[in-house]
Amino acid sequence: AQKITQTQPGMFVQEKEAVTLDCTYDTSDQSYGLFWYKQPSSGEMIFLIYQGSYDEQNATEGRYSLNFQKARKSANLVISASQLGDSAMYFCAMREDISNFGNEKLTFGTGTRLTIIP
Amino acid sequence: EAQVTQNPRYLITVTGKKLTVTCSQNMNHEYMSWYRQDPGLGLRQIYYSMNVEVTDKGDVPEGYKVSRKEKRNFPLILESPSPNQTSLYFCASGRPLGGRVNTGELFFGEGSRLTVL
């Protein structure tokens, strides 16, 4: 089974609209972290937002928010008021403590390519 | 400036010629990891390290070796590269999640594009 599933290979969104990028995960660990990275065409990985499994509030960072639904095992990224500069590849990822002794494993999804249309 | 530095950024080599991609971080991070990125497959973890002299396999370790003799360095070694190792490689570092006192952010290097002919 896939640890991280991103079901949207590509999305096209009109500028200034909000966009939701889907991410579901699979883990039996109680302690884990979920996050999103942006990869523009230049190739670097840009950290966007992080949600810990014990955090009760949804994480927010500026225009980015993470809609964390623990029971559904989903961690969707919401971008409000999209901008042309948001066009990029977006990766959802999970860090999990696979041994309960601080031995972490990290898994990325296959990504969603977001294109913002003027 | 906090950073993760990878070298080389670009490399074209031939099958069987041993190569090393270096990775160094200046943030005193315990956790370091290597990934390869291939179209349609996202980033896949090759090896990771929780601290000095502690390394473990990720999802795709075959054909790679790593070492962690110092906290700041985590080189990736391809003993006998093959064409299927042609890929974009990323090194990353961060603090362990165990303390739950950090954002979980991983700091990535700029990537190393490797072509094996």
Image: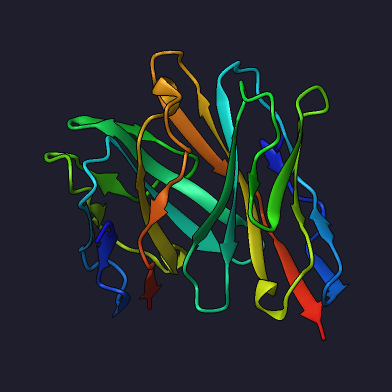
Indicate how the structure is coloured in the image.
rainbow
B4 with respect to A68 (left or right): left
**Image x and y of residue A101, in percent:** 39, 14
**Residue under the point 83% across and 73% down:** A16
- Residue at (47, 45) in percent of width and height: B45
Quarter in which the N terminus of chain B is drawn:
bottom left
* Count of numbered badges drawn on the protein: 0
Image position of B11 with respect to B73: above or below: below
The residue nearer to you, when weighing A12 against A85, is A85
Q: Which quadrant: the C terminus of chain B?
A: bottom left
- Residue, far bottom: A118
- In this view, which residue lies farthest toward the left? B69
The image quarter in which residue B4 lies: bottom left
Q: Nearer the viewer, residue B1 or B22?
A: B1
Task: Please determine whether, in this image, residue B102 is positioned above or below residue B115.
Answer: above
Q: Is residue B61 left or right of residue A76?
A: left
Instruction: Judge by depth and name the residue closer to the eye, A16 or A36.
Output: A16
Image position of B88 with respect to A66: above or below: below
Whether residue B61 is visible? no
Q: Please provide percent x and percent y for residue A98.
A: 50, 21
Horizontal arrangement in the rendering, residue A40 relative to residue A101 (left or right): right
Residue B75 visible within the image? yes
Q: Nearer the viewer, residue B7 or A46?
A: A46
Q: Is residue B64 above or below residue A56?
A: below
The residue positioned 72% from the left and 68% from the top of the image is: A113
Estimate the x, y position of residue B44 in percent, counting from the top left.
Answer: 52, 49
Where in the figure is residue B93, as x and y percent of width and height?
A: 34, 46
Report the residue at 18% width, 32% height from top.
B52
